[in-house]
Image (spheres, rainbow, N blue to C red):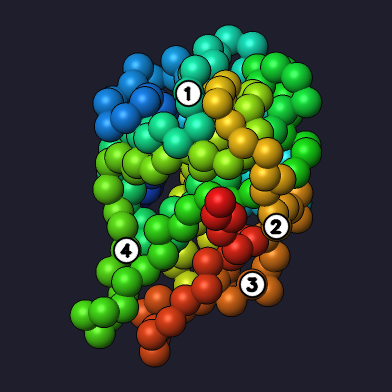
Amino acid sequence: MKNVVALVATVALAAQGASAHYIFQSLAKGTAKGAAYEFVRRNTNYNSPVTDLASTDLRCNVGGATGTNTSTLLMNAGDPFTFTLDTAVYHQGPISLYMSKAPGAAAEYDGSGDWFKINDWAPNFSSGQATWTMQGTYSFTIPKCIPSGEYLLRIQSLAIHNPGGIPQFYIGCGQITVSGGGSTTPSPTVKIPGAFKATDPGYTANIYNNFHSYIVPGPSVFTC
């Protein structure tokens, strides 16, 4: 009987942990809620995070190395877009947007090239304590000055809610074609994996102890 009770408790805790996870599953123009996995590569790890800083899964999640079964969203430079999750972000930590230009079709690109960051949702300390942007949708715009072409548009939630534990990356990659772009070469750029290090202050931060400032891991944000 004790074994049965222990098993039930273990299953309950596992279910609770899984329910606290989330998936970036749709991308659409404007503020619309897109269809799940129409323009976002489908991952194969359900709602589990990536935790290995050396893994190529950090690019587009587990199972997201290619997107041959994913459509590519047509957008103009400067257009707004929205990523939607299956459930709102539950864990404290920054949300970041990255882009990487494909050498050909976005659907065939594995993300091994250069990445640049276009936005961070970092904590706000104006109230005297950290306030995180934990929501079910995230909207931004395609930079107007980047060259036209096909891109991976990557969104990342870095969950640092468990100091002393391993931070968790929740990742989704959309496929887009950008038209009407400019001639600016985005910088700085990074490779993924390689952009995030275990020694980064924003990776090792304890958000519950003397937490008054924060530096989001990765490169600085590119602006036109």
- Residue drawn 38% across and 20% down? 36
- Element type where label 1 sits in the image: strand
- Residue drawn 40% across and 76% down? 207
Give the CA distance from mark 2 to mark 4: 25 Å
First in sequence: mark 2 or mark 3? Answer: 2
Q: Is residue 206 visible?
A: yes
Tell me whether circle 4 and circle 1 mark residues in contact (CB < 8 Å): no
Q: Nearer the viewer, mark 2 or mark 3?
A: 2
Q: Which mark is residue 164?
A: none
- Residue drawn 78% across and 39% down? 113
Q: Which residue matches tag 1?
A: 75
- Element type where label 2 sits in the image: loop
First in sequence: mark 4 or mark 1? Answer: 1
Q: Nearer the viewer, residue 29 or 145?
A: 145
- Element type where label 3 sits in the image: loop
Q: Nearer the viewer, residue 13 or 88?
A: 88
Give the CA distance from mark 4 to mark 3: 19 Å
Residue 124 horizontal side relative to residue 66, left or right? left
Q: In the rendered structure, which amino acid carries the disc numbered 1?
A: Met
Q: Which residue matches tag 4?
A: 132
Q: Write down the quadrant of residue 181 in the picture.
A: top right
Give the CA distance from mark 2 to mark 3: 17 Å
Q: Which residue matches tag 2?
A: 188
Q: In the rendered structure, which amino acid carries the disc numbered 2?
A: Pro
Give the CA distance from mark 1 to mark 2: 23 Å
- Element type where label 4 sits in the image: loop
Q: Which residue matches tag 3?
A: 200
Q: Is residue 200 above or below residue 191?
A: below
